[in-house]
Amino acid sequence: MSVQTEGTDTAGEPAVRKTRIPGPPRGEDRGSRPPARRGTAAPYLLLLPALLATVVLLGWPLVKNGMLSFQNLNPRQLIQHLTEWNGTDNYQEVLTGSDFWNVVERSVVFTAVNVVLIMVTGTLIGLLLARLGKRMRLLLMIGLVLAWAMPVIAATTVYQWLFAQRFGVVNWVLDKLGWHSMADYNWFGTQTSTFTVIILLLVWGSVPFVAINLYAATTTIPKELYEAASLDGAGAWKSFTSVTFPILRPFLYSTTFLEVIWIFKAFAQIFAINEGGPDHLTETLPIYAFVQGVGNQHFGVGAAISFLTIAVLLVMTSYYLRMVLKQEEDEL
Amino acid sequence: MKRSLFGRLWPNATAVVLFAGFVFPVYWMFATAFKPTGDIISENPVWFPANVTFSHFEKAVHADNFWTLVGNSVTVTLCSVLLSLVIALFAAFALARMRFRGRRGLIVTFMLAQMAPWEVMIIAIYMIVRDNDMLDSLVPLTVFYTMMVLPLTILTLRGYVAAVPKELEESAMVDGCTRVQAFRRVIFPLLAPGLMATSLFGFITAWNEFPLVLILNKDNEKQTLPLWLSQFQTAFGDDWGATMAASSLFALPILILFIFLQRKAVSGLTDGAVKG
């Protein structure tokens, strides 16, 4: 690689860059410049490894996923390395069953609840950070950073312990607070209670990202704007809605959609905490695809579910993706 | 007067409560890991470990294959982070400093790649890896983890490269450096903190990765720590002391790295490097 870059040293980039600068020097440069073709190859050579990796390791699995979803691929075919195309059978099987639509609905609601909780709590904590004195801010920051840095599987295990039926702290506290029926409560016995634990875990782990970044964003707001607002007679709420919020809006948009993506495809937390149980009732789309595809060894059907999951995700984030693409075009 | 006292109090009080809420799970993990079993399974929680014991850690460390798995996790994480840094550095340099056809399309591609739902692509990856007879091997894990962290690494590094003033590079070249030398001697040292900060997220992703290793590596000696930890509790029954000790051991490197690198990442490095 270094040889290739070395070859472009003299001509490579400055030449390319200078073509953007209008003016007389350009003409002079042109004469002394070595062949331009070497210059134009440089960026592509530098990008080649990254592109190759993306095509082979991301593009190919996506294509493969699409191909698998049109195949009849069960243990027999898997072991004998058979390729049996079965048209749209997998999709028909998935889309006509009620299971899939239940899971879609559950995933969408699950994502919505989580994202709303994360964004509201995160924003409030971010604004609180901006209000706090130096020492208290540092204290809260430490707490947030620790929760943020906690590895997912470690956090999941700890939450299993916190919510353990016997000797779990949560049950003990609820009991002491007067809710005695919770003394030996099995959190992983029902859909609602399992989801409660999962949501707490996800919110706890995701809020720090929002809060810390939002706080960082508020520090960029010029103080003069608030002074001007208060001169105009704006109260705390008014100056929030007319100064803080408009400036933070792009940040809030992008963070919300990032959270949608992250929560929607969350796998480790849900799977590790109860494997989608009890009775498959906490399976979201990624878990459902895994359980159907790998657990039940209907790999073709699993691939079809995966593809549909990606489609749902694309629909949910299409607005944001369009915005990002537009923004990039403006910036570049 | 009263009102302003209240107005000063509530943010601080809220902050303390929130701090406790966010820290408690982390604290409880370490606290449980150090408590004797009698204090763990007690009717009333023992909030502070008065009698510290290391027996749970001993049990976790002496679990089957523990050190093999540590080796696996470290190898896979380090290799994929380094690999992605190298690949990303080339790409980021091209994207930040050069103008060429298709540049915009590439940036958008990497932005989309960054959001790739790996969790739902595991079936296809399983098939690809199986068809190449690479199941129960660390190589596919390393390769795919590299790809998982690559787009974000490229995009972040692009920012860091762009933040190094062109003037520095140009003046080095005026002083007789070649392009590569200018990069190695001027840009690269300035990029070092950026590289460290960027690698942090790669470390976290690779160290934590769970779905792919779950499906690819069934062989107990070829797994990584997240998978082991998720099964630890099942393996040890309700031995919460040992489970929490295992969690602590797994979490500690990332917690340290995070706290250490977060501070590093913040320090503005090029401020003042070019002021005239």
Image: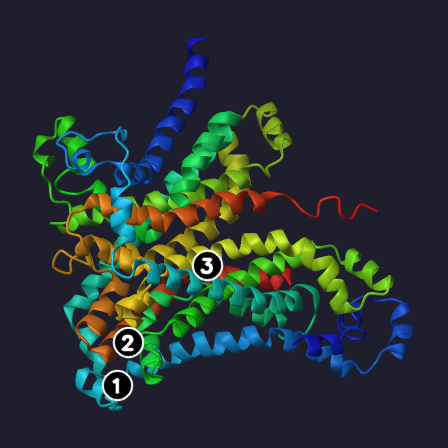
Q: Earlier in the sequence, mark 3 or mark 1?
A: 1
Rendered residue at 27%/28% (across/down): B50
The numbered mark 2 sits on a residue in which chain? A
Residue toward you, B96 or A97: B96
Asked which quadrant contains residue A45, the reply is: bottom right
Q: Which residue is mark 3?
A: A320
Residue toward you, A246 or A162: A162
- Whether residue B159 sits left or right of residue B144 in the image: it is right
Rendered residue at 53%/36% (across/down): A244
Tag 1: amino acid = Gln
Rendered residue at 46%/69% (across/down): B147
- What numbered label is drawn on residue A303? 2
Asked which quadrant contains residue B87, the reply is: bottom right
> From what the image shows, is residue B223 above or below residue B49?
below
Expressed as whole percent of the image width and height from the top left, the position of residue B2 reads: 42, 9
The numbered mark 1 sits on a residue in which chain? A
Q: Which residue is mark 1?
A: A71
Tag 3: amino acid = Tyr
> From what the image shows, is residue B223 above or below residue B263?
below
Q: Nearer the viewer, mark 3 or mark 2?
A: 2
